[in-house]
Amino acid sequence: MPSYLTAPRSRPGPRRRSLLTGAAGVASAALLAGCTDSAGSDTEESSAARRLRAAAAKDSRELLGRYDAVLAAHPSLAGRLAPLRSEVKQHADAFAAGRAPSTPAATASGSAAPSPSAPAGPSPSVPADPGDAVRALAKAERELADRRGQALLDAPAEEGRLLASVAAAGAAHAYLLTEREGDK
């Protein structure tokens, strides 16, 4: 009788199931944040929301700067990184404008080429090896997603939902950036 069991994968890094579980946890926390009663006044909440959005926009612009630096140092990675970079730019724009990012379908059909409007400030150092540069991007995405996951616990409802969505996207980006390493 043939065996239908397959050998377990020995690929390093998170599995799709754990990625989806993590994203579901972030989304659940956002829903809970949206259901809590507001203890402060509307002015305090709107001030906290503005500060949260400003900090999140700054973080996204810094991550966008990392993508731009890697693409400048390793143009051969453009096909792989441009779609993720485009989404990071949409996240920065969403936090800056106070609106939700556009749908993934719009992202896929939109221009994925980096824009010349890189964030101001010093350019982050980029490893000479393209693989190391991609791993550094994955680490930055993962760390930012983790920080955003923690920040959404105290976020006002609207900002918590946006933060949860962008944190889940960042976790997915980190996964996609490290996915090819297991294929070698």
Image (cartoon, rainbow, N blue to C red):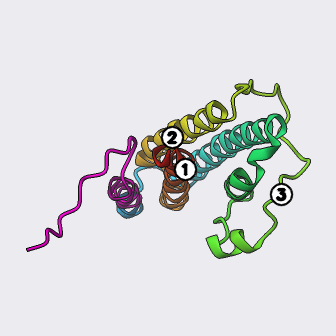
Nearer to the camera, 52 or 179:
179
In this view, the mark in front (3 or 1): 3
Q: Is residue 17 above or below residue 121?
A: below
Disc 1 residue type (three-letter):
Gly
Near mark 1 (Cα within 10 A), the count class, few <14, some 14-19 or many ≥20, is many
Per the model, the C-alpha gap separating discs 1 and 2 is: 6 Å
Instruction: Determine the secondary structure under disc 3.
Output: loop
Task: Name the residue that disc number 3 marks.
Answer: 113
The structure residue drawn at horizontal position 33% and vertical position 58%, both measured from the top left corner, is 17
In this view, the mark in front (3 or 2): 3
Nearer to the camera, 60 or 124:
124
Q: Which quadrant of the structure image shows residue 74?
A: top right
Query: Which comes sooner in the sequence, label 3 or label 1?
Result: 3
Instruction: Determine the secondary structure under disc 1.
Output: helix
Query: Which comes sooner in the sequence, label 1 or label 2?
Result: 2
* Picture mark count: 3
Task: Name the residue that disc number 1 marks.
Answer: 170
The structure residue drawn at horizontal position 36% and vertical position 64%, both measured from the top left corner, is 35
Per the model, the C-alpha gap separating discs 3 and 1 is: 19 Å
The structure residue drawn at horizontal position 40% and vertical position 42%, both measured from the top left corner, is 13
Image location of residue 62, percent across then percent down: 72, 37
**Seen from this angle, which residue lies furthest left?**
1
Tell whether 151 sits left or right of 5: right
Tell whether 25 sits left or right of 70: left
Nearer to the camera, 4 or 153:
4
Q: What are the residue bounds of the magenta stretch?
A: 1-30
